Image (cartoon, rainbow, N blue to C red):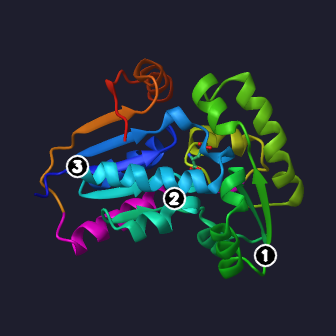
Amino acid sequence: MNSRPIAVFDSGLGGLTVLHALRGRLPQEDFFYFADTRFLPYGDRPEIFLRERGVLIAEALARRGAKALVIACNTATAAAAEAIRAAGALPVVALEPGVKPAAALTRSGVIGVLATTRTLASERFGRLVGNHANHLKVVAQACPGLAEAIEREGPASPEVAALLDGFVEPLADAGADVVVLGCTHYPWVAEAIARRMPPGVTLLDTGEAVARQLERLLLAGGLVGGGQGRLTVATSGAPLAVTATVDRLLGAKMHVEHWEP
Ligand code: DGL
């Protein structure tokens, strides 16, 4: 029973940055990673679309035999986590931008947040800032096109560099000393972001925290173990294109299957 895989999903391959932390902490588990690349980028899509798509994906993953679900996407969490939980198909771990740890770390009193337009416009993000960073200056910078450019052109491409120049400058100008990577695609360009900030800036992503939370959820539900560390990668888009992107991001050849939720 426990040998069923843990499902992880994102609009694309940003969630691989989270998967890395999950597999590091839970090497005995099997994972099924689903990249919804047919609908990448999520960040520019209406909330209602993301909510319905999220519930559909979660229910299909439950039918496919997943024992738990990690929503490895800040945008999908903001739009759909509550609806997915309410649908109750399977236990869920969601992630959100690390505003709370950033508030504990900042000395300058200025936090930068890089995320998608949809995440920053969400009620959930407004609540997060209201609850944890009301006393601080929060520079929330939407990064339209960035996740897509990281996948299509590669993290080291001139297209990504030009986008980062524009998105990171307002954070540096405002004196942010902590930058929250509020989209799971952005750890792929963490070094390039750090280079555009003054020395000593802290970059925060939530992969490790999500891994700890998943472990707690599995323990509480008696769902731990039983796998063999296997990984299956699937996409709603073109498997060959995703294989090429995985290769570019991870330097690894990986079989990618087509799956339609
Ligand atoms: N990786 C996703 C996130 O964490 C979103 C990227 C996209 O716009 O599709 O927000």
**Disc 2 vs disc 3: which is toward the camera?**
3
Please indicate whether residue 8 sits to the left or right of residue 129 in the image: left
Q: In which quadrant of the rendered view does residue 134 lie?
A: bottom right
Query: Vertically, is 71 above or below 189?
Result: below
Q: Amino acid at mark 2?
A: Thr
Asked if the magenta segment contains residue 46, the reply would be no
Looking at the image, which is closer to me, 75 or 261? Answer: 261
Q: Which numbered disc, 2 or 3, marks the residue that appears first in the sequence?
A: 3
SS class, disc 2: loop
State the extent of the magenta-drawn residues as a range.
Answer: 200-223
Q: Return the mark for residue 206.
A: 2
Q: Is mark 1 within 8 Å of ligand 1?
A: no
The residue singled out by tag 3 in the image is 5
Q: Return the mark for residue 136.
A: 1
Q: How many marks?
A: 3
Q: Amino acid at mark 1?
A: Leu
